[in-house]
Image (cartoon, coloured by chain):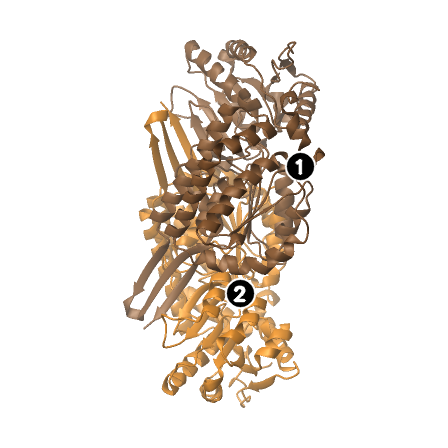
Chain colours: A orange, B brown
Amino acid sequence: MSKGFRTFQAALNTWDTQLYFPTPTSFLQDWENNIQEAQKRFKATTPTQRAALLLRIASFLQQDKLDIQEVYCRESGLSKERFESEFARLTNTIFVFAEHIQQFSWQKQNILPLENKTLLKKRIALGPVLVLGSSNFPLAYSTMGGDTTAALAAGCCVVVKAHPMHVGTSLAVANCVKRALQELNLPDRIFSHVIDNTYAWATTFAKHPQIQAIGFTGSIKGGRALMDLAAQRPRPIPVFAEMGSLNPVVICSDLQIVQIETIAQQLARSICTDAGQFCTKPGLLLVDATHFETFKKLLLEALATLVAVPMLHPDIYQKFEACKRQVFQVKGVKPYQSNVNQDGLKGLWGIAQTTPELLLIESTLLEEVFGPFAVLSPFENENVLQPLFEKMNGQLTISIFTNNALDIHPVLTHFIEEKVGRAIINGVPTGVSVIEAMHHGGAYPASSDARFTAVGPDSILRFTKEVCWQLHQ
Amino acid sequence: MSKGFRTFQAALNTWDTQLYFPTPTSFLQDWENNIQEAQKRFKATTPTQRAALLLRIASFLQQDKLDIQEVYCRESGLSKERFESEFARLTNTIFVFAEHIQQFSWQKQNILPLENKTLLKKRIALGPVLVLGSSNFPLAYSTMGGDTTAALAAGCCVVVKAHPMHVGTSLAVANCVKRALQELNLPDRIFSHVIDNTYAWATTFAKHPQIQAIGFTGSIKGGRALMDLAAQRPRPIPVFAEMGSLNPVVICSDLQIVQIETIAQQLARSICTDAGQFCTKPGLLLVDATHFETFKKLLLEALATLVAVPMLHPDIYQKFEACKRQVFQVKGVKPYQSNVNQDGLKGLWGIAQTTPELLLIESTLLEEVFGPFAVLSPFENENVLQPLFEKMNGQLTISIFTNNALDIHPVLTHFIEEKVGRAIINGVPTGVSVIEAMHHGGAYPASSDARFTAVGPDSILRFTKEVCWQLHQ
């Protein structure tokens, strides 16, 4: 067994050992028999009642925390520390959303005395939402993750398709949701959970006339397939898919050497934390030529001190190695990667040094490599970056390191306004705050709809619509 | 020449007389050369600057009002009274939006002191928008109509494809927009205007990588074609298409006879005003059985007193007659229509009496007939309507006439929350107020995305996105 996933053989066994069986097709009939009534009753709840549901779910998650941790670490190979931070993120999101919906202004009113009428616009649930669990966040973007929490906060019933790589975690979390629904005497079909190691359930629900929206976090291929399915329905529905991103980093000329050292260390950690398996992992480092050699040396030094952790799944690891190889094979690219130690765990990371000219002609260099990997290039001045930004896809983030935060180069600001969801000044892209000012999205294919965020309370708006009541006297 | 369009031969001549030539394909090169710079500059304007632009446009429209009126009436066959009301609607929308964007909270901020960072989320323009002029609102939903005004208010450049039925009106209005841009020294490519009696320009722009959104008002066929084009792009873009609607009306049992008379008169006018060429024209009248015969008699009497106006275009008139015939030919339908007078103008309207059972099995009866036409059916009690509502498509509106405004039957409220954008209690669906509480949209195919409104200042949100700036200390 190769380095990168040897500590979590259990994940591999998920299907081999038949621990978890796919949900039988007979489930659909039960769902269809009950979903309309469940959605009707859930829509009729008040924000306070929905907040109570969310908080009850959080409290059951707290109760079951140790059990969830055990299966989470076993299935994903992620560390206990990572579990702690992701669990905190999960419950924090629930708390923030529960608070938000009670304060949110769900309606707008206009009284038109001359016309003797009153108009009241109410924001209500869009209807049942299909959520696809992500591979890289078994908690925060899966069963009761950002999409489900947003949908429940809005009053939408949810069908979660568990990600096949962490079905046990998904079941443990789903169990908490189901208990909360039971305790509050709410219909159990408000939350449904299906298991599947094919595309069958995802396709069935994506096409189902009762499903009104889809939430997805994953690959461009997967997200686009869902977008296409949704667009081809007799009655199309919105999809919010959060897909790939390179998360370019720009290191400007005005920095001091001492700052470069700190930045190199920050970026090394940002690239490698949890084996770089984040949608916000920095994947393209553009460094002003004056600092390039210094930065490269410091980055490689910092990377050399980091100990790799196993990747989430053998498939992900194999894909990572294949993509890394593909980039390294591009003519003109200078490859750097860790030496494999005897324990097989040192390393994993790769850095591909290139040039702005090569970036412009080699599309492979502008494709996301999921894992601890980044493309590194010097640039003479920001104007050189313009054609590169024009070629580049939409991005979740850009990070800019500079001492002139108030005077960002117009080439950068233009790129940000055209294609980027979040611009980080003097910080790394990993670490997404669950707050109102967050925007986690970006032009396609960073997300399927740049108008909505996947993180923060505004993400609830993905799953609401408005109805105007117009009363005549 | 048949009744219905004989007073506006000029409209027919639009293309025959070669008054207006299609925009040559060479235009595209000029547009491509300038759109990015124009969008960059327009995005950088403040809401106050954009409000100034909107108000300047309104003032040029006022200056040219008489010229616009002349070509509007000549091309559309619509009356001067209708021109006055549509012109007021047009300028009012501009005023409301100009006011709104100056008060709107364009950003959200969170300061996270523990993490030493500040997040600022700004709402900005989505990018260039393609707007397709509608046939039935030469002013309010065309060149400088709701979509264009919303897009300009957001800071998006606009390409308008003039509706071929009123190219002269479109040119006259476009001229005002162009003068305002010139006077304020803004790039002229902020607003572009193309003429075309085929689908060529619409298709070219709908597929163009620079176009970031589409606004459309018209048929389901046209709207869906645009949705499909947009979804198939390498980088899909959002489409807001406002398409067909039956606008069902429900007349409840609790009303008094004297009320029925008023309602019959209101509905007769709502069906026939401007030859029923409104997306909100009531097209399905469901009347409680106890009032059915009385209502029918009063409605037919009221209709008999109305004088028809010509339809917008011979094509629309012919399609109206064909659709009306199709419904009348359904077995079991009882047709009512006006007697044609010697002047050929009396009438136009049609009423098709049917039953709830027939509505359930004959899909033809549930398709919009654009023009002064409605399907009329009695019902025994609201529960009978449930399967009908389940079968029915999404609707822009429903009107409910009742003395128990606070106790709407659950079958109706459920239908409203599932599929309807606006519920009018004791009023007709025609007449849409341009205010914040308005929602003009609905489940597909009333609109392509139930989450957005086509009318009122919230319609600006169709054409904005958010960017988060995250600053680290």
Q: Residue at x 42, y 65 (%)?
A: A67
Name the secondary structure under disc 1: loop
Residue closer to the observer: A41 or B274: B274
For residue A185, what is the image quadrant? Answer: top left
Q: Which mark is residue A135?
A: 2
Relative height, residue A300 to residue A241 (above, below): below
Query: Hey, which quadrant is residue A393 in on the image?
Result: bottom right
Relative image position of residue B117 (x, y in whole percent): 33, 69
In this image, A208 relative to A129: left or right?
right
Is residue A187 something one can see in this rendering? no
Residue B457, image x, y percentages: 42, 42
Q: What is the spatial separation of the Cα atoms under label 1 and label 2, in whole angstroms?
A: 61 Å
Work out whether A263 lies above or below B131: below
Which of B21 and B132 lies nearest the eye of the viewer? B21
> Type of residue at label 2?
Ser
Residue sitting farthest toward the left: B113
Q: Nearer the viewer, residue B53 or A97?
A: B53
Q: Quadrant of the N terminus of chain B?
A: top right
Q: Please say if the residues under marks 1 and 2 sit with CB atoms less than 8 Å apart.
A: no
Residue, x 62% and y 62% (percent of image)?
A: A221
Q: Position of residue B256 (x, y in %)?
A: 41, 11
Q: How many marks?
A: 2
Q: In the rendered structure, which amino acid carries the disc numbered 1? A: Leu
Chain letter of the residue beneath label 2 in the structure image: A
Residue B19, disc: 1
Q: Which one is in front in this view, the residue at disc 1 or the one at disc 2?
A: 1
Q: Are marks 1 and 2 on the same chain?
A: no
In depth, the one of A43 and B228 nearer the eye is B228
Disc 2 secondary structure class:
loop
Q: Position of residue B373 (x, y in %)?
A: 59, 21
Residue B261 appearing in the image: yes
